[in-house]
């Protein structure tokens, strides 16, 4: 997008520069002032794993972590992430190429069917385990309740999150390599 010196894009809309740390990498992007974080992540920064679904902050498919707090990126203005750390599903794979505990737990326990909600579920799981490494089932249920799954019936998702917590604990204690 091309901007003049006043911060206005050629289309006449006001724009702003959003600087954030995306999956551990410092990034800056010019975006219309009314752009959602979802649009900027998908269209400008190439994070296609962030799903566009209800676009009203209801379904959870677009969940990302801003400073480790899950947010619906479809109902968050991009400028709200200025200066923040934003994590998306694209950033979950560990530097060595190994899947994160959340990804491995969902794979092992089949916590997905169609896969549409999975990226949001993975981000909720990651946020939960960063906050509470040993959540009980009620905490897991409450935590993932903001993401709608129309396929699994949630039991496999609950098992996947429990397995992810086990895997994260094993990795922290040196049990997995």
Image (spheres, rainbow, N blue to C red):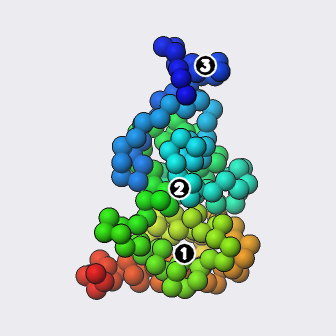
Who is closer to the viewer here, 48 or 8? 48
> x%, y% of residue 53?
71, 56
Give the answer, above or below, for where 175 lies relative to 9: below
Which labelled disc corresponds to residue 10? 3
Give the residue at mark 1.
Answer: 139
Give the answer, above or below, for where 84 lies relative to 103: above
Residue visible at 69% across and 60% down in the picture:
59
Give whichever of discs 2 and 3 has the lower sequence position: 3
Q: Please, what secondary structure does the residue beneath circle 1 have?
A: helix
Q: Please, what secondary structure does the residue beneath circle 3 have?
A: loop
Instruction: Kindly indicate the quadrant of the structure image that contains residue 68.
Output: bottom left
Residue visible at 48% across and 74% down in the picture:
103
Q: CA distance from mark 1 to mark 3?
A: 48 Å
Which labelled disc corresponds to residue 64? 2
Instruction: Kindly indicate the quadrant of the structure image that contains residue 132.
Output: bottom left
Give whichever of discs 2 and 1 has the lower sequence position: 2
Q: CA distance from mark 2 to mark 3?
A: 30 Å
Q: CA distance from mark 2 to mark 1?
A: 19 Å
Residue visible at 39% across and 46% down in the picture:
21
Q: Residues within 10 Å of mark 3 (few under 14, many from 20)?
A: few
> x%, y% of residue 2?
53, 23
Which quadrant is home to the N terminus?
top right
**Residue 76 visible, this angle:** no
Give the answer, above or below, for where 76 lies relative to 57: above
User: Which residue ends up furthest to the left in the rendered image?
Assistant: 174
Q: Is residue 129 left or right of residue 7?
A: left
Who is closer to the viewer here, 139 or 159? 159
Q: Are marks 1 and 3 in contact (CB under 8 Å)?
A: no
Which quadrant is home to the C terminus?
bottom left
> x%, y% of residue 57?
68, 52
């Amino acid at each position: 997008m091309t901007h003049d010196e006043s911060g206005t894009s050629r289309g006449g809309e006001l724009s702003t520069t959003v600087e954030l740390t995306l999956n551990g990498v410092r990034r800056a992007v010019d975006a219309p002032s009314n752009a959602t974080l979802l649009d900027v992540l998908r269209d400008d920064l190439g994070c296609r794993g962030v799903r566009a679904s209800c676009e009203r902050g209801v379904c959870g498919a677009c969940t990302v972590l801003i400073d480790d707090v899950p947010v619906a990126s479809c109902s968050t203005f991009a400028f709200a992430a200025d200066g923040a750390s934003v994590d998306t599903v694209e950033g979950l794979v560990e530097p060595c190429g190994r899947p994160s505990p959340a990804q491995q737990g969902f794979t092992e326990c089949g916590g997905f069917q169609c896969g549409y909600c999975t990226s949001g579920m993975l981000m909720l799981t990651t946020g939960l385990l960063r906050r509470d490494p040993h959540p009980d089932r009620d905490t897991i249920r409450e935590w993932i309740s903001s993401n709608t799954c129309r396929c699994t019936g949630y039991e496999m998702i609950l098992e996947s999150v429990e397995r992810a917590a086990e895997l994260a604990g094993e990795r922290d204690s040196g049990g997995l390599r």
